[in-house]
């Protein structure tokens, strides 16, 4: 494996970006990784993800190929996922002293892949905290035709909006809420490799279909505040995620399994 650049130096996160994040439920950050850094990590992430996705079906009705927990397949991917630069951004955005990794995944949306339907991540996540956020970083420069992120402003303040599984029904369900509550939808027009978005777990979000002739390559890493407890394991999804991403911790226990590494601590 080619030696990968160090990405533990800190990013200059402005207070205005933190304020925007809390007000709107998402934020776009530019140049979090340099072109050289993201190019080197892209090669490693792509290699591991494509090996994992071989002979797999697409997820969520043909929205994309998803490779979960690939940091266990590669020290290079692990280095990306446990980067202190990314971890400190997550901690600063949540206004906490320490964060743990919940899970990560490479998401590759191929030409013709359908839209990623509206959903709220927190509906699936088995943690009893709202301090749980997700990073989405493209590995290549992306435009709107490739199916990039879309968010519903201020939806993170509304909690669980009767979430359902991610499919056409969830799209219709949230479209109705957006219309009734006159919420604003923000669709990104472009985002470059090494830029990223963060969003709260209750933020309604999705992505458009890929109308281009290129694969939209992205990496997702999710973080939560250290000291959080496992929430109610009252659905099949939450039970499954507790086993897969929290080392089988039980409801009410501190979510401190060794797999949930502390990525940053001040």
Image: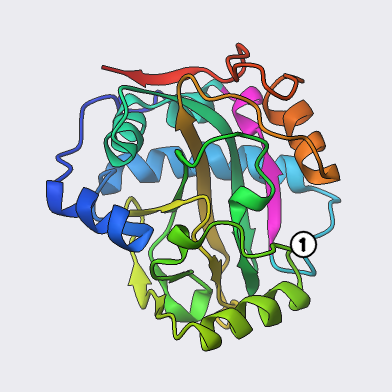
Where in the figure is residue 61, as x and y percent of width and height? 80, 69
Q: Nearer the viewer, residue 191 or 248?
A: 248
Q: Which stretch appears magenta?
A: 64-74
At x 46%, y 59%, the residue is 156
Q: From what the image shows, is residue 102 above or below residue 112?
A: above
Characterize the local packing of mark 1: few (<14), some (14-19) or many (20 or more) Cα atoms within 10 angstroms: some
* Residue at the extreme top of the image, as rendered: 258
Q: The C terminus lies in which quarter of the figure?
A: top left
Residue 266, placed above or below residue 45: above
Quarter of the figure with residue 143: bottom left
The residue to which callout 1 is attached is 165
Tell me which residue sits at (26%, 35%) in the image: 92
Query: For residue 70: magenta?
Result: yes
Q: Residue at x 65, y 42 (%)?
A: 125
Residue appearing at x 33%, y 63% in the figure? 24
Residue 70 lies left or right of residue 76; in this view the side is right
The type of colouring in the image is rainbow
Front-lying residue, 85 or 27: 27
Q: Is residue 236 visible?
A: yes
Image coordinates of residue 213 in percent, x first then y, are: 57, 78
Occupied quadrant, residue 193: bottom left
Residue 158 screen position, x and y as percent: 50, 62
Q: Does residue 112 appear in the picture of this structure?
A: no
Q: Is residue 180 above or below residue 213?
A: below
Q: Indicate whether residue 82 is drawn in magenta.
A: no
> Residue 106 vs residue 68: left or right?
left
Residue 12 is left or right of residue 155, and the answer is left
**Labels in figure, total:** 1
Residue 4 x %, y %: 38, 27
């Amino acid at each position: 494996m080619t030696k990968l650049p160090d990405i533990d130096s800190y990013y200059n996160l402005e207070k205005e970006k933190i304020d925007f994040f809390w007000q709107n439920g998402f934020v776009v950050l530019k140049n979090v990784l340099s072109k050289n850094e993201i190019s080197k990590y892209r090669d490693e992430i792509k290699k591991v993800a494509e090996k994992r996705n071989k002979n797999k079906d697409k997820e969520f009705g043909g929205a994309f190929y998803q490779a979960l927990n690939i940091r266990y397949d590669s020290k290079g991917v692990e280095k990306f996922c446990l980067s202190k630069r990314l971890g400190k951004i997550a901690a600063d955005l949540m206004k906490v002293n320490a964060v743990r990794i919940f899970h990560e995944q490479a998401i590759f949306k191929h030409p013709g892949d359908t839209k990623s339907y509206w959903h709220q991540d927190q509906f699936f996540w088995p943690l009893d905290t709202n301090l749980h956020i997700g990073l989405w970083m493209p590995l290549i420069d992306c435009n709107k035709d490739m199916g990039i992120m879309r968010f519903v402003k201020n939806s993170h303040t509304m909690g669980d909006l009767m979430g359902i599984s991610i499919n056409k029904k969830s799209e219709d369900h949230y479209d109705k809420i957006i219309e009734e509550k006159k919420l604003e939808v923000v669709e990104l027009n472009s985002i470059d490799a090494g830029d990223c978005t963060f969003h709260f777990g209750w933020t309604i979000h999705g992505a458009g279909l890929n109308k281009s002739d290129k694969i939209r390559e992205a990496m997702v890493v999710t973080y939560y505040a250290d000291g959080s407890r496992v929430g109610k394991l009252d659905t099949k999804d939450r039970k499954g995620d507790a086993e897969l991403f929290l080392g089988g911790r039980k409801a009410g226990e501190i979510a401190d399994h060794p797999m949930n590494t502390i990525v940053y601590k001040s």
